[in-house]
Amino acid sequence: MTRHVRRTLLLLVLTPLLYALVGAPQAASAHTELVSASPKDGADLAKAPDHLTLTFDEPVDLADVRVLTMDGNRLPVSRTAGGAKDSVRVALAAPEGGELAVVWSVVDEEDGHASSGRLTFGVGAATTTTGGDEAASPVPAPSPSVRKGLVAARWAGYLALALFVGGLAFVTLLWPRGAHEPRARALLVLAWTVGLLATVAALGLQGAYTALGGMRDALRPATYAEVLATEPGVVLASRGLLWVLAAVVLGALMQGGAGTSRSPGWRVGALAVAFGLLRATGMAGHNSEGSEPTWGAIADFVHLLGASLWIGGLAMLTVAVLPRRRAGELAAVVPGYSRLAAVSVTGIVAAGLVLAWQVVGSYDALLHSSYGHLLLIKTAVLAAVLLAAYASRQWVRTRLDLAVLLRGDAATVRPFGYSVAVETGLVLVVLVVTSLLVTADPGR
């Protein structure tokens, strides 16, 4: 058992090196925003321009930039004559009524966040109004219902990832016989199903979110086609394909049981799928923002890996191991998971500190930004989780032997079950806050 935990610790140490070899991300600076427009917003022009130049604070892909007229027609977007990666050229149509107005939106390549706004110009004898209905109308923004749906899909995706990767690791390293346990099998199948469905739903919701559409747009095939042309869409599609490959790994485990979980070939396949799922999930976050994007990406990977091993093992322990109350299993599995959880939590905390430094960047941003506030809430809830985890670990140290001697007596095991249940519930709250952090602007 100790040997397996040591291997997991070695994996935590070596994985960042493998992650760096796979590819280092480029630096970014919070969400993509419009820096300037030519002509300028609110300008009074003698005649209507034939094009508009938009310059952003970082390089953008043409597929990520949308410019619409006020009646919803999409305008052609191309590179500027100089070929600058942070600027685009928008072909304009002749205005009606002496005024020209367009709505722009851009998708951040790193996390899929959509920024948007309106540009209005006076043409000819007309002057741009500053206090009418046009000025008073709100700036176009993604639908709140779509944003909530996207947060929910991400929460479900995080939870499914943790349950699947952590559950497989638990069965492989600590409890090979669990491959035959119906509850353990059901948990893994549920995690796989939710992971695949959440990814498919996130694709449609991401498309509706970036197009500033509503929930109906999330169900249209055209929305899927458009989002697949963007980098966030490609990342989501890759994650969906990895979930399909994960079905092969899961199916082999279901058929072969404990023998398959010990097979080197199956373990290599499971490790490859888990690595891909973790990496694809981390590519849709803020980890690459800041001065050291490579360290941020590595820290995010370690953070996800540690959380998956901890949460997935916790769920497997709660759902499948404790209800059986078998003395031999408790003696073999619980101490091993306790050590694995300690290693995972250490990795989570260390990586979390690196991510906080990388993304937030200053105490002022931590205390005076919505992203910083969410991060503080997550830290506070995580502290409560660690207290529950400490209570569980103390039970393992002081009461596990007695529980084994009493052959899994319910009264003896019950306090451990309570602390594990509290730990599990608080972890779900942490995942909710994590999902909100992905859509929040770090404001660097």
Image (cartoon, helix red, strand yellow):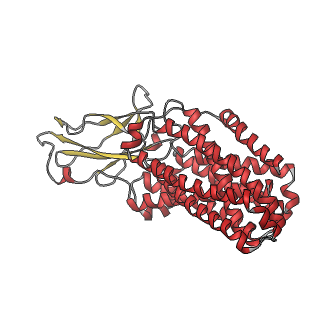
- 143 or 93, nearer to the observer: 143
- 8 or 71, nearer to the observer: 8
Name the residue at the top extreme. 82
Please tell me which residue is depicted at 49% across the width and 64% down the height of the picture.
219
Name the residue at the bottom extreme. 410
| Camera sees residue 161 | no
Total labels drawn: 0
Q: Is residue 7 left or right of residue 370?
A: right
Q: Position of residue 342 (x, y in %)?
A: 68, 49
Q: Is residue 313 left or right of residue 253?
A: left
Q: Position of residue 27 (x, y in %)?
A: 51, 32
In the displayed structure, would residue 153 be above or below residue 183?
above
Q: Is residue 295 left or right of residue 121?
A: right
Query: In the rendered image, which quarter is residue 318 located in?
Result: bottom right
The quadrant in which the C terminus is found is: top left
Q: Position of residue 335 (x, y in %)?
A: 76, 56
- 243 or 356, nearer to the observer: 356
| Camera sees residue 326 | yes
In the displayed structure, would residue 190 be above or below residue 131?
below
Please tell me which residue is depicted at 79% across the width and 62% down the height of the picture.
401
Please tell me which residue is depicted at 59% across the width and 64% down the height of the picture.
422
Q: Position of residue 324 (x, y in %)?
A: 77, 72
Name the residue at the left extreme. 125
